[in-house]
Amino acid sequence: MSDGSDHPVLLFDGVCNLCNGVVQFIIPRDPEGRIRFAPLQSAAGKALLSGHGLPPSDLDSVVLVADGEVYRKSNAVIRVAELLGWPYRAAAVGRAVPESVRDTLYDVVAANRYDVFGRKDQCMLPDDDVSDRFLD
């Protein structure tokens, strides 16, 4: 597994079915394997959060660490879409919506994600063919 230092790293809730579905959506759309992944609950996830001044107990926000910047909530989603290229990068038009409005919508989804999409008993284990994209 990689340490992710030279790649964007997406931190996600490893037991959330919605979050795991998003990771599974991203993987084939990033064939060069630029984006790395780590569950927020993992040692790598907690270390990245702490290293960027974020509480390791915050499991309600997807976090993207890329090019020395930290993106959270809707900004993380938009930045990941940009990294995936066309047609996903068109999501950048979402920046025309005030961040407070985007993040309020994000928070509603995050608060209800387990009720709507369910949760796993443990963090997902990546398939062998993509395990190098997941941080320890």
Image (cartoon, rainbow, N blue to C red):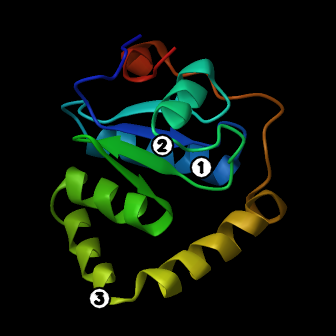
Q: In the image, is residue 101 above or below residue 44?
A: below
- In which quadrant of the rendered view does residue 77 lie? bottom left
Query: Does residue 20 appear to the left or right of 79 in the view shown?
Result: right
- Nearer to us in this view, 79 or 51: 51
Q: Residue at x 69, y 29 (%)?
A: 123
Q: CA distance from mark 3 to mark 1?
A: 25 Å
Q: In the rendered image of this protein, does residue 122 appear above or below residue 117? A: above
Residue ranking furthest to the front:
53
Q: Secondary structure at mark 2?
A: helix
Task: List x then y, in percent, for residue 59.
Answer: 68, 47
**x, y (%) of residue 54?**
56, 44
Label 3 crowd bin: few (<14), some (14–19), many (20+), radius 10 Å: few
Q: Amino acid at mark 2?
A: Val
Residue underneath mark 3: 96
Amino acid carrying label 3: it is Ala
- Give yes or no for contact between labels 1 and 2 (Cβ–Cβ under 8 Å): yes
On the image, numbered disc 1 is attached to which residue?
19
Q: Is residue 127 left or right of residue 7?
A: right
Q: CA distance from mark 2 to mark 3?
A: 25 Å
Quarter assignment of residue 9: top left
At label 1, the amino acid type is Cys
User: SS of the residue at dot 1?
Assistant: helix
